[in-house]
Amino acid sequence: MVHPLLYEVNARQWMSELSRKTGEAIDLSTVPDQELDTFKRNGFTHLWLMGVWPTGPKSRAEAVNHVDLRRAYAEALPGWTEADVLGSPYAVADLHVAPLLGGDIGLALFRKRLNALGIKLILDFVPNHLGLDHPWLQARPHLFVGMGERFRDSFAVQSHEGERFVAHGKDPYFAGWTDTVQLDYRRRETRQAMSELLHSVSEKCDGVRCDMAMLVLTDVFHGTWHHVPMDVDLAAGEFWHDAIAHVKRDRPDFLFLAEAYWGLEGRLCDLGFDYAYDKALYDFIVHDRPWDVQPHLLGLGSHNARRAHFLENHDEPRIAGSIGLDLHRAAMTLGMGLPGMRFLHDGQVEGLRRFARVQLSRRAVEPLDEDVNGIYTRLLPAFAESAVGRGEGHLLVPQRAWYDNPTAQCFTVVQWKKKDHDNRFDLVVVNLAPHRAQCRVPLTVEGLTGGIWRLNDRIGHEQWIRNGDELASQGLFLEVEARGAHLFAFERL
């Protein structure tokens, strides 16, 4: 089993930066080879090209005039102008690639080059809402929440069916996104239309990241919109179960990643998603709660292999400005070393600190943080040479080194082994706590006994020699410094 290593890049801002660096107008069809070679060299298996769909003029106008967003643009991009605002890529006007990125033809050429390097392409699918400029708002207004009734947060549109009042897209806890319109998943016709749309996207890529995927779960949707009356029979079942199955009938290897919160990740995976965000792990790290990490991960059990582990994405603050360097190194080793999807964000490797607003066509120019970059230039090649992500990964259960020492709970230890490597395996060891910690870890690989094992730290300088009989009977004793992280290569001598 291959555990994906995903890299997210903002397509609009990436093209802008490449154009600035090269002095030429770059789109997806003309991305320089060295850019793609860097993805390959760093071991990425999937590239999430975020924001390829166009934003129309109505949705863009909302992004330009929104008071809070204008303040946010000033923080993200000092000296910004309205020409820099393209609008949110999640207020989708059409599911054909934006012309400024090279259109569908440019995307097809880009995907072909990626696939030739063994890298698969991930695109966005936004299930909950569409942009104000989407043609369905005029041609098929009945697909949206509203039904001609005036209610809170509604707005009027002129459609082929006359004036309609519809709702902005939203989640249950916040006001609506004013650049969007809310699809009505209580309607069979809406579900069918969105399933067909999802299938059309699957023809352009190798997987999708589904925005706020939990919002269209039947109970979540009804909880959000129960106050809006319906004049038709409700659709039965779950949208995701049928829509994912429809795609996977033609593309069994097509990847589905759910942006998911509120403890609903497991339900979405049960409905067909390959992976769902592990936001709980992210929160434990950025809020420095090391004692909560091990219970969380062990509690997930085999579902760790269905989670996407990240320190940063386009919705979160930059990690380099959120935690210290020592915790950053330990947390990155942890995220890279877990089963499931490993997930990095554009600018994370360089240690950028300014939050890059998705509505903007470019981001601020920042200097390389050599200390942060040094973490990644050591970790990425080391993991690429190991069994991590390519073999079978198992979370081990650290035991107390002695009876009154509770620090074993600060550890996360993951054992990785390829099936054809009988005399070799790798061990990821992380102590997230701000103090030294000790434990004993029972290893589960077969064939430990009757030999001597050498342990080389792929990301450090330690080398140990251990007796296989002792490892099998007593486990591996570990004493690790505060925020310590190791990637041990075990080899039988």
Image (tube, helix red, strand yellow):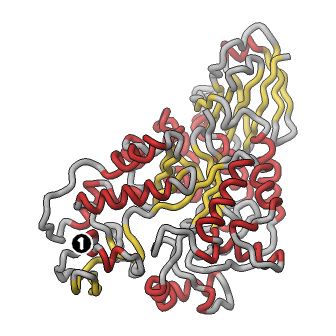
Question: Of the residues shown, which amino acid type is indicated by label 1?
Answer: His
Left or right placement of residue 108 versus residue 30 in this view: left
Residue 212, located in which quarter of the rendered image? bottom left
Residue drawn at x 80%, y 49% as measured from the top left: 41
Comparing 252 with 81, the one in front is 252
**Residue 167 at what x, y percent from top left?**
29, 77
Q: Tell me if residue 375 can be seen.
A: no
Marks counted in the figure total: 1
Quarter of the image with the N terminus is: top right
* Above-or-below relation of 68 to 167: below
Residue drawn at x 76%, y 57% as measured from the top left: 36
Q: Residue furthest front?
A: 105
Residue drawn at x 39%, y 80% as measured from the top left: 132
Left or right placement of residue 402 versus residue 203 in this view: right
**Residue 50 at what x, y percent from top left?**
58, 65
Q: Residues within 10 Å of mark 1 (few under 14, many from 20)?
A: many
* Above-or-below relation of 247 to 21: above
Q: Which residue lies furthest to the top in this view?
A: 450
Residue 248, located in which quarter of the rendered image? top left
Q: What element does badge 1 sit on?
A: helix
**Residue 163 at what x, y percent from top left?**
22, 86
Residue under pointer 1: 142
* Above-or-below relation of 61 to 203: below
Residue drawn at x 61%, y 62% as measured from the top left: 49
Quarter of the image with the C terminus is: top right
Q: Tell me if residue 33 can be seen.
A: yes
Comparing 58 with 356, the one in front is 58
**Residue 156 at what x, y percent from top left?**
27, 86
